[in-house]
Image (cartoon, grey):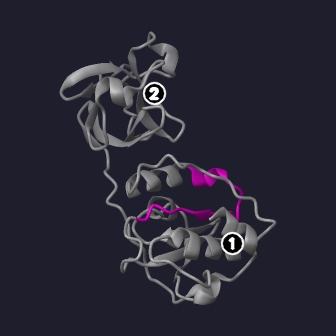
Amino acid sequence: MKGVITNVAPACTVIDLTHQIPAGDIRAGAFALAASYRFFPKGTVHLAVVDPGVGSERKAIAARTANYFFVGPDNGVLSLAVEREKVEAIRVLENKAYFLASMSQTFHGRDIFAPVAAHLSRGLPIEKLGPAAKDFVRFKWPRPCKKGAAVQGEIVYVDRFGNAITNLDTESLRISGKASAQVFIRGKRLCALAAFYQAAPPGEPVAVPGSAGFLEIAVNGGNAAECLNLGVGLRVEVRYR
């Protein structure tokens, strides 16, 4: 993919966001993109490929928002980022003039998405890529639920350090007048909510507001996913007192 981009746009700066997404895990890719895209300069072309449906009837799309471009399969991997932006145009990638001349059915990242992203970086109008699309495939992102003096959510992503990131964002955790917060998993108290990882003793669990804006469960100096048997979809409850 980098070779294709460099051939089309030699002056383009290519930055790898991550290659640590588990194979075929579209939601993990969507979360990683949504947590990171806004830190890049305006006009950046974001290319995301987690594509277990490559070669099938799933669409290939490019989106232009008020600030960025997004290119990838229309399977939800772009959705968490794009829906946070003011969308100006969505195009289905059908104009083969901007694909590789020889295409495979198993590597559209190289043959379609990479050359399209490179052409966009050179100023190609998105309208030339194909017909307009009215919408894109969206994930049903789990929403936090407030119940009295508690907030319920779930783990949505596990990073390479084994930190379990939840869907409990900063706003969800703001319950006025409640100073002390405890995190419960599987009905049992796990740890307290703290400001930083080393607020807990080495080897002990702690929950902190993470850099992506969501509560994450960690182990000081360890891998929380392995030590605590945590995984995506596991329910998490924060109780205040």
Secondary structure of the residue carrying numbered label 1: helix
> In this picture, is 38 found above or below 67?
above
> In this picture, is 81 found above or below 98?
above
Question: Can the viewer see residue 163 in this picture?
Answer: yes
Alpha carbon separation for disc pair 2 and 1: 38 Å
Q: Is residue 44 on the magenta stretch?
A: yes
Q: Which mark is residue 159?
A: none
Q: Which residues are magenta?
A: 36-51
Quarter containing the N terminus: bottom right
Q: Earlier in the sequence, mark 2 or mark 1?
A: 1
45 horizontally vs 73: left or right: right
Question: Can the viewer see residue 239 in this picture?
Answer: no
Secondary structure of the residue carrying numbered label 2: strand
- The location of residue 81, given as percent across then percent down, is 50, 59
Residue closest to the eye, 124 or 187: 124
- The location of residue 32, given as percent across then percent down, is 50, 50
Q: Quadrant of residue 194?
A: top left
Which residue does the image show at 28% across and 29% down from the upper left? 229
Answer yes or no: do the residues labelled 2 and 1 have beta carbons within 8 Å?
no
* Residue type pointed to by label 2: Val
> In this picture, is 213 found above or below 22?
above
Q: Is residue 210 on the magenta stretch?
A: no
Instruction: Residue under label 1, please give it.
Output: 118
Instruction: Residue under label 2, please give it.
Output: 208
- The location of residue 46, given as percent across then percent down, is 60, 63
Which residue does the image show at 75% across and 59% down from the upper left? 13
Quarter containing the C terminus: top left
